[in-house]
Image (cartoon, coloured by chain):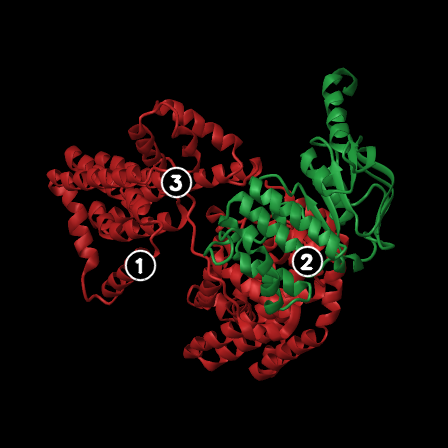
Chain colours: A red, B green
Amino acid sequence: MFFKFLRLEFKSFFRGTSLGINLAMKIFRFIGILYFMGCLVGGAFIAFFYIKEEMHEDPLKIVSRFLIIAWAADLIFKYMLQEMSTQNIKPFLTLNIPKKTVVNYTLVKTFFTPLSWLNSFFFITFSAIALFNGYGFVGVLSWLIGVSLLFYLNNFINILFNDKETIAIVVGCVFAAVAGLAYYNIVPVLSYSEKFFFNFYERPYFVVISILLFTALWKISFNYIHKAFYLDEGLEAKKTIGKTENIAFLNKYGAIGTFINNDIKMLRRNKVTKGILIGSFLFLFYGMLMFSSPLYKTPAMTMFMGLFVTGGFQFLFGQRVPAFDSSYYPLMMTSNVPYKEYLKAKWWLMNIMTGVSILLAVGYAYFGWEMYVTFFAAGIYNIGVNSQFTLWAGAFNKTQIDLNAKEKRFGQKNSFNLKALLLLIPKMFLPMAVFGGVQHFFGIGAGVVSVAIMGLAGFLFREKIFDIIVKHYKVEKYSTLEAFKNKD
Amino acid sequence: MITIHNLSKTYGKATVLNIENLEIPSGETFGLVGNNGAGKTTLFSLMLDLIQPTTGFVSVDDIKVNESEAWKNKVSAFVDESFLIGYLTPEEYFYFIGELRGQNKASVDEFLKQFHDLFNGEILNSGKYVRDLSKGNQKKVGIVGAMIGNPEIIILDEPFANLDPSTQIKLKNLIKELSKQDGVTFLISSHDLSHTTEVCNRIVVVNKGKLVKDIQTDPETLRDLEQYFADQVSKPVEMI
């Protein structure tokens, strides 16, 4: 029975549209997986011999020491990326298949995603090397089984808690707290980890703990799914309660206000756009790159970071501007929507967010006022110049976006377009060059002022660029409509 | 008035629509009937300037739709779910549409009152987003949305499909009322001959992209149409 299911699964992979990837993307994905497999196998060798030869420590102990971090990271990744797919289960419900089999099948299926089994490449290789280097067979085997089961049971934890955001937040806070305690050496988390995981080797009977945990969680998940295995419960796509809301003061601004209101709702209520919000928040920390390499300490690179720190939302949102509205583009095209108003609404929204980012970036003043002033100038440039150019680049992006697909949050395939790439020159390189140059000759004050002036100039000429984009929209209207209609 | 002149649409070698002349005067309730693939949706898409004609043009009150956008003030449409915004609640959707057509919230609320019966308590204040409504209820939202803001011309593609019998009757009454009171021009496509003959005062049959029948509705129309489609079935060889 399982074998039949698997065959269906293969077919759905090769014929499927749910992943939204064409053959090229599949190959790319496959190469990516191969790459990670290589990395993990190689990593196992490096980890073992580096620790042994260079650090003169016990590799098994040191690896055990950091396993707690790997385990937590594994859980976090699974929570973010892996969703138990239940949609293709529906046809089996009325067929003559025991429910037990179907439930177990959905559980087992989660183990087949690369995210689940990739870590085994590391552990198996590492254990094999350990065996060849004089570690006891029983100990290593018990270590491998114990550790692997603990990693694989993350799948069950993910199934149980994936749709419960509050629990996820609590767990996230606990993780952060533990990480903090470990970082400041208040609680020696790492040595607990070492003790715990190394126990599997030293006292092989400890593996029973893992096995018990694994079976218990399997049982719990089984019951959880079994109970909710009805169309109107677990198998139903999750619905949220809709609330009618409206930011009243925006209504004063006519069509622009209406559009901004609508966009805010879009950002808050769809999975993809929530990802954008999280992404733009993370971009605020982009400036931390300066700690990675002295290269980032140069003025031009500080400007580069500033553009991303203040413009995260702008870049992520702006380049998908008509694409976000793809699912109801025919409505927009037949309604009495003036393109310019539509664009301006997006423009305002982006700039408000950029403004907020500029305020939040004040934190960087901690690393010196010069840094913040540079970021500030970058923010002005983002508002004045880049906002228009990003919208312009977005007009070339004709990838249809399914607003509610979680799997596309990362690696949303972007249509690479030469013109869109060319627009990177005014967007990134121009301010970097000007700031770097002026700062070199006249000092930082002049550099900041010159970039800010460019921002102001862009602000004054914005109507011109809007006109160009509007023209582009009109020329490309039919092909855009066509492209947005294609569901992969 | 809608004028169609020498309109055709070709994909590769296949001509999916070819209409030489068609005039739809104001205030008419115009029914478009045909089998799957006859070109009904293509015709509507051309009227709404969603696709480009290969030859000819459609004009609304002498405005060519692919040249000016002024027709957008007069026309509203509900063709399929791509005219709905899934992440809004039905109320928000109506307000959004209303605001684009120059209505404020209060006037939209006032307008919606008459649909209380049609909505059957399942749409307004239901605590659901449009994307989570059933297909039938989504259709109701789309159709009512197309009526907001006193458009002169309303285009509805397959409005009766997916609706329950009571709603079909209510919708028919609504269309009759709007066309009688406000002189709204309706363009309705359907597979369902009896619904179409009931509400429309003119019916056009398209087959394989060509206009094959153009009749003013009278008590005989339904029988005529049924006979026509029955003939199509009984001589399949000729069709190929």
Secondary structure state at the residue bearing disc 3? loop
Q: Do residues under tags 1 and 2 come within 8 Å of each other at their CB atoms?
A: no
Same-chain status of marks 1 and 2: yes
- Measured in 3D between alpha carbons, the distance from the residue under mark 3 to the one under mark 1, in whole angstroms, is 26 Å
Q: Is A6 in front, or is A231?
A: A231
Secondary structure state at the residue bearing disc 2? helix
* Chain containing the residue with disc 2: A
Residue indicated by mark 3: A235
Q: Amino acid at mark 3?
A: Leu
Residue indicated by mark 2: A422
| Percent position of residue A379, x then y | 56, 74
Q: Do residues under tags 3 and 1 come within 8 Å of each other at their CB atoms?
A: no
Q: Is A349 in front, or is A139?
A: A349
Q: As drawn, is B9 to the left or to the right of A323? A: right
Q: Residue at x 42, y 33 (%)?
A: A90
Q: Do residues under tags 3 and 2 come within 8 Å of each other at their CB atoms?
A: no
Q: Is B29 in front, or is A331?
A: B29
* Chain containing the residue with disc 3: A
Residue indicated by mark 1: A172
Same-chain status of marks 3 and 2: yes
Asked if one can make out residue A143 in the rendered structure from this viewpoint, the answer is: no
Which mark sits nearer the N-terminus, 3 or 1?
1
- Measured in 3D between alpha carbons, the distance from the residue under mark 1 to the one under mark 2, in whole angstroms, is 41 Å
